[in-house]
Amino acid sequence: NEGNTHLQAGEEDRAIECYTKAIELESSNHVFYSNRSAAYLKKGEPEKALEDAEVCVRLNPSWVKSHIRKGAALHALRRFEDAVDAYNAGLAVAPGDRALTAGLEEVQAAQERAQSGGGGGRNGLLSPELIARLAAHPKFGPKLADPAFMAKLQMLNTNPQMLMADPDFMELLSVLTGGMAGAAEPPSDPAPAPAAPPASAPAPAAPPASAPAPAAEEGASAERVQALEAKQRGNALYKRREFEAALAEYDAAIALDATDMSFLNNKAAVLLEMKRYDACIEMCQDAITVGRENRASFADLAKAMVRMGKAHLKKDDLDAALEVFGQAQVENYTKDTERLIKTTELQKRERQREAYINPELGLEAKERGNTKFREGDFPGAAEEYEEATRRDPTNAAYRNNLAAALLKMGDFNGAKLQCEKALDLDPRYVKAWAKKADIEFFMKEYHKALESYRKGLEIEPDNQLCRAGLQKTTRKINEASASGEVDQERAEHALADPEIQAILNDPIIRQVLTDMQSNPAEGQRALGDPTVAAKISKLVAAGVLQVK
């Protein structure tokens, strides 16, 4: 929830930090990856957004939003065909879903514009997608309310030459075209660059034109210049997803200058994009060898290692990927690689958890736990029940048994947590509602106990545990109100409850409480409202309000 609050406030970095901590605590929760993917996309880091979206899809392929996250990230990377596949995969799970359909239509429209060579269709650079991109930009987003700035945007379509003297023009154009203008080398996680801007835009905005000319390398031999020219042609072809032609240009560069590892590393990026993972790994190894022989920078060596690790990830070889990522950190430590290591380690632990699942062994552990429970060995019973939950994590009864053992050990919070997990697995599990209510009663959270007992009775009206518990709790509340004494422990529990805090901060309820003191007749009239009456009753049950 804290991460969501930061994300809504536009604090993407803090939101990402919160979601990362949540993932470290519960690596199997697909929602955390989905939220972090959204934060990365909003921050303008679609490659990281895609990584989290792919983990989200693996964890819960039937969840519609996981496919939406993946499609949005691929769209932002301008990998239109892959984005279409992502949205179609979601529609296979949820045919007709409006969000998936809308996303698919948007990416297909963007793909058509890119193929036709028009950056923004009939509206030029002012398409809805690009306006949305500007709105999310920290610098240009607030300027959309400025009429002068909007006029400048219109001028991009009609007379862009008039803006050449504007210092913000090139940055603005870079944002509109995807922030890739001037890129001369494939990114660390290959993703083709955006399509060229409309024909009316000035020439410097086109990626090849803004890259440094190879001939500018002082003292370079003719072969070196030709190699750099071939590399630049390869980069341009890569961005247009003409991969076979790009490979030919990189091969030409390698033939002219076999001492530059960047040519091999760029070729590896293309092979990774083509899903030729073994060839990519071999090319990265060759690049590292050449780099070491020719004293390449530690950063360049690490870059090749990270690419090799990503190829191992695509092959689903997590151990090999972790080994290579670790070697990359030794060469040149980066936070991005550290994040890759943590994400891969979490994925590996999740695989191990899934491999450990065995319902038959879970049943055996549960029976051992029952025996220990009957013998009064509650710590031993809790240990066996925990083993049962690991062996069969979808069995709600094992969670409820674990709660019973923890309750005997005096661990009320732990017992309540296990009841809640049981109810997450099976919301109609009446025994878990009754157990949860019993724990809330012991913790003097009578208002919560009432609600839990009632939930159980909604499912099974004749359940004796819930009926007896409801009567016991109601009697306890009435006794406390009649005594006129304030139970400090009970009040502290209630005031720490967010629901009680929200009721006390409700201006309508505050006015009713005031009326009940100064104008009882008006207060009684307000209690005729069922919503108000329910909230007042909850305050009484919580011990915050006493009625004599």
Image (cartoon, rainbow, N blue to C red):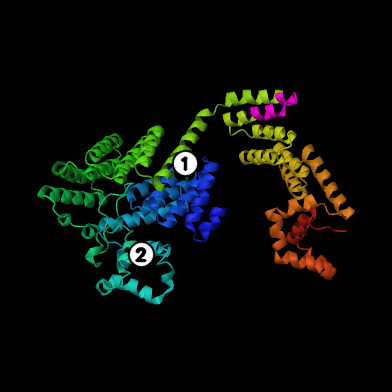
Q: Residue lying at the far front in this picture: please name it.
A: 295
Real-space CA distance between mark 2 and mark 1, rounded to the nearest whole angstrom? 32 Å
Residue 460 seen in this snapshot: no
Local SS, label 2: loop
Residue 499 percent across, percent down from the top left: 69, 55
Residue 190 percent across, percent down from the top left: 31, 47
Local SS, label 1: loop
Q: Residue lying at the far right in this picture: please name it.
A: 483
What is the span of residues highlighted in magenta in the rendered image?
372-384
- Earlier-in-chain disc, 2 versus 1: 1
In this view, 253 is above or below 131: above
Picture mark count: 2
User: Which residue is rendered at x = 72% and y = 26% of the image?
Assistant: 377
Q: Amino acid at mark 1?
A: Pro
Location of the C terminus (image quadrant): bottom right
In the image, is 304 to the left or to the right of 548?
A: left
In this view, 159 is above or below 536: below
Q: Residues within 10 Å of mark 1 (few under 14, many from 20)?
A: some
Residue 367 figure quarter: top right
User: Which residue is rendered at x = 38% and y = 36% of the image?
Assistant: 321
Residue 117 figure quarter: bottom left
User: Which residue is rendered at x = 85% and y = 47% of the image?
Assistant: 475
In the image, is 539 to the left or to the right of 124?
A: right
Prevalent SS, magenta region: helix
Q: Residues within 10 Å of mark 2 (few under 14, many from 20)?
A: some
Residue 21 drawn in magenta: no
Q: Residue lying at the far left in this picture: please name it.
A: 222
Residue 503 percent across, percent down from the top left: 71, 59
**Circle 1 sits on which residue?**
61
- Label at residue 127: 2
